[in-house]
Amino acid sequence: MDIIKDLFGQKEKAPALTKDAFEKLPRHVGIIMDGNGRWAKQHKLGVALGHRQGVESLREIIRHTDDLGIGSLSIYAFSTENWNRSPEEVGALMQLILEFFASEIDELDEKNVRILILGEKDVFPPRQRETLIRAEERTADNTGLILNICLNYGSRAELTRAARLIAEDVAAGRLNADEVTEKTISDRLYTAGQPDVDLMIRTSGEMRLSNFLLWQCAYAEFLFPTVLWPDFTVADYDEALLAYGGRERRFGGRLK
Ligand code: FPP
């Protein structure tokens, strides 16, 4: 990280807003951290350094989310499709997973943050898998911010898993097919017990959901700032949160 800080300096620090600056805050924020590759290209660096700088943005955003008292933050760190990237890029992301937890776990645990890994962990190399399991176990009883780190995550895979769990319950006689409700499904997603996503942010100007939290985003508000993820600051985040506060949410009904 230090090499990058030396090359580009610390990001400009705009004062972060406090909770009282917001009329309404989301209970659950989702973020697609897009643009690391383009940022690296712009700076004539390898993609691995783009991801590395992306982790710097992530640290700040997690801290601010916690400071604001938002209940859940879901970040898309590695999708089921990301395995198709070059072995060098996948290797760099695997290394960043180890470094991220090594450097952040103490502070996150101290701040009462609960870490959940959304996605199948068994396919990760042993060191990464162990790290992820340990982070979940260590923070399991924490009651503050729920940090959903989506790794090897795909929403269709998550919904397919839920369907399989329901089928197993029906087959075993624990559940009747005609008792299956939306809650039956929600309860079998990785996000069980958490509110739906209120605000989804995708950086870099791309306007796609890319198989991220499809069910949980049924009524989410979407924002697509054009800034690339490594350049996304707490000030950009505050701007997005203020914009969210100005949205009228009707959930399919009419305003009175
Ligand atoms: C998308 O940018 C970003 C990713 C595929 C990975 C995001 C991961 C991190 C920020 C770091 C890893 C996180 C943890 C918790 C260790 P892109 O490479 O698709 O950007 P591009 O569209 O500009 O090429």
Image: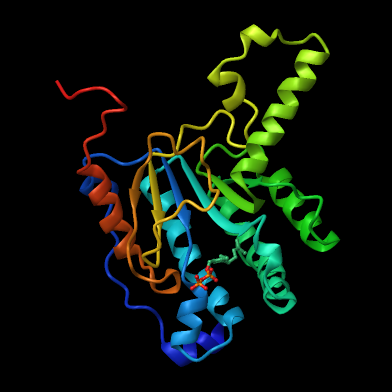
**Residue 132 rendering spot, x and y as whole percentages:** 73, 53
Residue nearer the viewer, 105 or 245:
245
Q: Is residue 232 left or right of residue 104?
A: left
Looking at the image, which is closer to me, 173 or 128? 173
Which residue is drawn at the image coordinates 31% and 27% (left, top)? Answer: 251
Instruction: Work out which residue is located at the far left of the displayed protein and give it.
Output: 256
Q: Quadrant of residue 26?
A: top left
Above or below: residue 177 compared with residue 109: above
Q: Residue 143, position in %: x, y?
A: 55, 37
- The residue located at (64%, 50%) in the rendering is 153
Residue 37 locus on image (x, y percent): 52, 76
Q: Where the N terminus falls, by quadrant?
A: bottom right
Quarter of the C terminus within the rendering: top left
Residue at 21% x, 49% y: name it.
Answer: 21
Measuring from the top left, give residue 148's x and y in whole percent: 57, 47
Quadrant position of ligand 1: bottom right
Indicate left or right for 239 with 202 as reference.
left
Q: Is residue 66 left or right of residue 243?
A: right
115 vs 2: above or below = above
- How many numbered callouts? 0
Q: Is residue 184 left or right of residue 248?
A: right
Location of residue 230 (image quadrant): bottom left
